[in-house]
Image (spheres, helix red, strand yellow):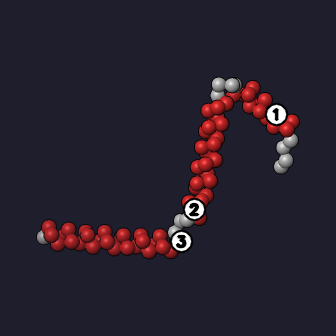
Amino acid sequence: MNLGWTEILLLLGLALLLFGPSRLPGLGKSMGEAIRGFKKGISDQDEAPPARDVKEQLEQQSQASQAQKENDKQRQS
């Protein structure tokens, strides 16, 4: 998708007509933040642990919480 300078000027003019000059800076800022968040989400996804590791961690947490509940019951008795 190659945009020439005339298409870019047409899009900017249309945006100016639709949103007005006072709202364009805020619109640009919010679009920039959204793009940065999207890129960060993609890069974080690459660093996420494999599902097997997550499953093992959940099982360990479950076992630890069950052991804690048993210890609490024994202390109450």
Query: Residue at (83%, 49%) from the top-left corner?
Result: 1
Q: Is residue 28 left or right of residue 58?
A: right
Quadrant in which residue 3 is drawn: top right
In the rendered image, the residue lying farthest to the left is 77
The residue tagged with tag 3: helix, strand or loop? loop
Query: Residue at (62%, 32%) from the top-left corner?
Result: 26
The residue that disc 2 covers is 45
In the rendered view, tell whether residue 33 sits above or below residue 73.
above
The residue that disc 3 covers is 50
The residue tagged with tag 1: helix, strand or loop? helix
Rounded to the nearest whole Å, what is the CA distance between mark 2 and mark 1? Answer: 36 Å
Query: Residue at (47%, 70%) from the top-left corner?
Result: 54
Rounded to the nearest whole Å, what is the CA distance between mark 2 and mark 3? Answer: 10 Å
Rounded to the nearest whole Å, what is the CA distance between mark 3 and mark 1? Answer: 46 Å
Cβ–Cβ under 8 Å for marks 2 and 1 = no
Q: Nearer the viewer, residue 70 or 54?
A: 54
In the rendered view, tell whether residue 75 sits above or below residue 16.
below
Q: Residues within 10 Å of mark 1 (few under 14, many from 20)?
A: few
- Three-letter amino acid code at the position of disc 2: Gln
Query: Where is the C terminus found, in terms of image quarters?
Result: bottom left
- Three-letter amino acid code at the position of disc 1: Leu
The residue that disc 1 covers is 9
- Three-letter amino acid code at the position of disc 3: Pro
